[in-house]
Image: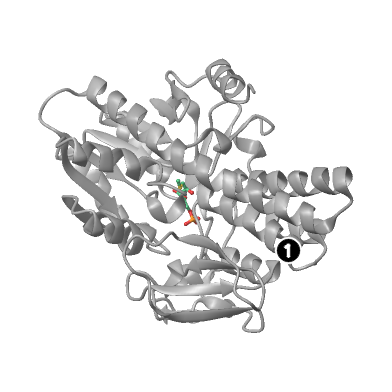
């Protein structure tokens, strides 16, 4: 982490504090993040005083997950504007910090457009900065509302697919309140099932190499008293074979116009397993994750991450920031293949659940209709 930009604060996060917030201390506005690289061992906050600090935090995965990346990007633009930096330069750097989650550039663009429009109208940079901040706050609130509606639609779908007995859900990566203005995407559905007394078990994939499942989903499941069990990614096959999975629920980083779903690496093998075992494979994502400008899987840029994340165990309190490794588990110099995401073809996806409703079967037409509904004024 670029120390000149960001400072960490102590272990001071009372339960329920948002994962991202805007603060205005006398020294000037800041964006405060819960540093997700340190969870679950420590709840530390990262204070970003400018957009480069936020870019570093995004690259290091201190702030992560598609919807939250959009919110962070929007606050980053607002921060650059409020601190008098070049907003367009900041927007370009923020939008390019990670390539796969489309929400990041959507959030950046929203705040940037609000800034541009206000500047054109008033010629006043302070008013333009306020407009960028208002756009970021609005996106934040909209995402919280979207979570609630995804949870409703997702639970209704689960109940329709399988009545009685409670749901045994397998999930991958992390999709709860750590990635959202609200309670998340796929995790929010599991939480709704739990609150309704219909969650029999949440199976949590550890999600190598960065353990978003073990570190973050297990943390969120424990905080919410969910009945959950952690498994290695490799154990999913035998879990399906044992008949222990009723549905797979995952989030998404980008959904192409044809319904191809980019999500954390390891999602595609789960879709193949689910199909073989006749288990529904359900993707839960806000409409902002659907990118009609990306036609298909081949057009999705999959982020490639450093090899040390595979050759080393990178875990909390192991220095990941600044490009260092963790605890080595492979011989020095071992080459590694480390795509952060994979792409599941639409024919393996049973349904895409959004705040606007559910698309099933997943077709380009169904997705386009859903998007046009949501983008109407
Ligand atoms: O690399 P990450 O941790 O940012 O990846 C996150 C995921 O893949 C999530 O599953 C995805 O963003 C959906 S979150 C609602």
Horizontal side, residue 108 vs residue 196: left or right? right
Query: Residue at horizontal 45%, vertical 60%?
Result: 19
Q: Is disc 1's CB within 8 Å of ligand 1?
A: no
Asked if 299 appears above or below 278 in the picture, the reply is: below
Give the image location of residue 68, x and y in percent. Answer: 52, 52
Residue 243: x %, y % from top left:
15, 36
Quick check: can you spot residue 333? no
Foreground residue among 103 and 101: 103
Count neighbours of disc 1 (C-alpha within 10 A) and say few if under 14, some if 14 to 19, many if 20 or more: many
Q: Residue beneath label 1, please?
A: 82
- Examine the rendered structure and indicate whether residue 357 appears above or below residue 28: above
Residue 354 rendering spot, x and y as whole percentages: 46, 30
97 or 357, nearer to the observer? 357
Residue at the image point whose x is 23% and y is 24% from the top: 159
Tell me the quadrant of the picture where the C terminus can be found.
top right
- Residue drawn at (24%, 59%), measured in percent from left and top? 223
Q: Is residue 294 left or right of residue 341?
A: right
In this view, the residue in front, 182 or 327, is 182
On the image, the x and y values in percent for residue 61 come to 52, 64
Quarter location, residue 248? top left
């Amino acid at each position: 982490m670029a120390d000149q930009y960001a400072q960490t604060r102590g272990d001071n996060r009372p339960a329920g504090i948002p994962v991202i917030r805007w603060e205005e201390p006398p020294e000037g506005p800041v964006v405060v993040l819960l540093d997700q690289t340190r969870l679950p061992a420590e709840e530390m906050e990262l204070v970003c005083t400018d957009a480069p600090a936020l870019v570093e935090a995004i690259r290091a995965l201190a702030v992560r997950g598609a919807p939250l990346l959009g919110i962070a990007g929007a606050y980053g633009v607002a921060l650059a504007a409020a601190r008098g930096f070049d907003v367009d330069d900041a927007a370009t750097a923020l939008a390019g910090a990670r390539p796969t989650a489309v929400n990041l550039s959507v959030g950046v663009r929203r705040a940037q457009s609000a800034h541009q429009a206000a500047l054109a109208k008033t010629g006043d940079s302070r008013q333009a900065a306020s407009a960028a901040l208002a756009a970021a706050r609005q996106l934040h609130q909209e995402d919280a509302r979207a979570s609630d509606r995804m949870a409703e639609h997702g639970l209704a779908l689960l109940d329709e697919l399988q009545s009685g007995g409670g749901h045994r859900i397998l999930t991958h990566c992390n999709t709860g309140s750590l990635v959202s203005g609200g309670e998340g995407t796929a995790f929010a559905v599991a939480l709704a099932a739990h609150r309704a007394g219909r969650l029999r078990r949440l199976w949590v994939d550890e999600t190598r190499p960065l353990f978003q499942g073990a570190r973050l989903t297990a943390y969120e499941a424990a905080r919410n008293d969910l009945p959950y069990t952690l498994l290695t990614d490799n154990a999913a096959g035998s879990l399906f074979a044992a008949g222990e999975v009723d549905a797979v629920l995952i989030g998404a980083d980008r959904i192409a116009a044809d319904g191809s779903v980019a999500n954390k690496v390891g999602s595609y093998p789960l879709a193949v397993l689910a199909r073989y075992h006749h288990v529904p494979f359900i993707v839960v994502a806000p409409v902002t994750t659907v990118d009609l400008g990306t036609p298909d899987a081949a057009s999705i840029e999959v982020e490639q991450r450093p090899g040390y994340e595979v050759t080393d165990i990178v875990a909390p309190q192991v220095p990941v920031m600044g490009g260092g490794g963790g605890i080595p588990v492979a011989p020095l110099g071992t080459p590694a293949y480390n795509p952060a995401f994979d792409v599941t073809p639409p024919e393996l996806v049973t349904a895409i659940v959004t705040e606007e409703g559910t698309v099933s079967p997943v077709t380009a037409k169904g997705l386009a209709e859903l998007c046009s509904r949501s983008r109407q004024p």
